[in-house]
Image (spheres, rainbow, N blue to C red):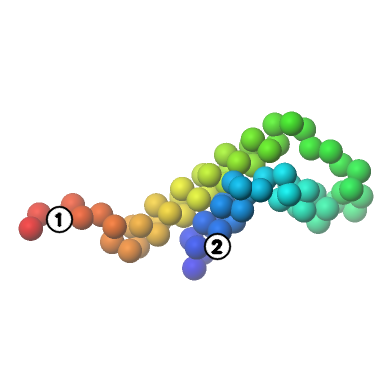
Amino acid sequence: MLRALLAAFGLVELLFPDKLVAAVTRLAYEDGDEMTAKPWVSTAARVEGATFLLVALVGLRGRCGGDDDEDE
């Protein structure tokens, strides 16, 4: 369940980094409307989202028995 949530969050962060950063800024600061993110923040959010998604998918693959390395 946690890996699925991590994958979902990673996908949202990968696809919509600017909207997510704006939403989190509004939640974290009292006057978040006046805050402006630096240009590199979107790229960093995309990288973080891709990393979350990759970690979650690798973990889910391991749980589902995706590796067929056994000799038959």
Residue found at x 72% / y 44%: 18
Q: Are marks 2 and 1 in contact (CB under 8 Å)?
A: no
Residue found at x 78% / y 48%: 22
Q: Is residue 64 above or below residue 28?
A: below
Residue indicated by mark 1: 70
What residue occupies the far front of the structure in this picture? 15
* Between 30 and 35, the one nearer to me in the picture: 35
Q: Position of residue 38 (x, y in %)?
A: 77, 33
Mark on residue 5?
A: 2
User: Image quadrant of residue 64?
Assistant: bottom left
Q: Position of residue 27 (x, y in %)?
A: 81, 56
Q: Is residue 37 above or below residue 10?
A: above
SS at mark 1?
Answer: loop
SS at mark 2?
Answer: helix
Query: Is residue 28 visible in the rendered structure shown here?
Result: no
What residue occupies the far bottom of the structure in this picture? 1
Query: Is residue 23 visible in the rendered structure shown here?
Result: yes
| Circle 1 Cα neighbour tier, 10 Å, few/some/many (<14 / 14–19 / ≥20) | few
Which amino acid type is shown beneath numbered disc 1?
Glu
Quadrant where the image shows the C terminus: bottom left
| Circle 2 Cα neighbour tier, 10 Å, few/some/many (<14 / 14–19 / ≥20) | few
Which amino acid type is shown beneath numbered disc 2?
Leu
Distance (Cα) linking label 2 and label 1: 30 Å
Give the total of numbered labels: 2
Residue found at x 39% / y 52%: 58
Q: Is residue 42 left or right of residue 26?
A: left
Q: Is residue 42 left or right of residue 58?
A: right
Q: Position of residue 46 (x, y in %)?
A: 60, 41
Residue found at x 73% / y 49%: 19
Mark on residue 10?
A: none
First in sequence: mark 2 vs mark 1: 2
Q: Position of residue 6 (x, y in %)?
A: 54, 57
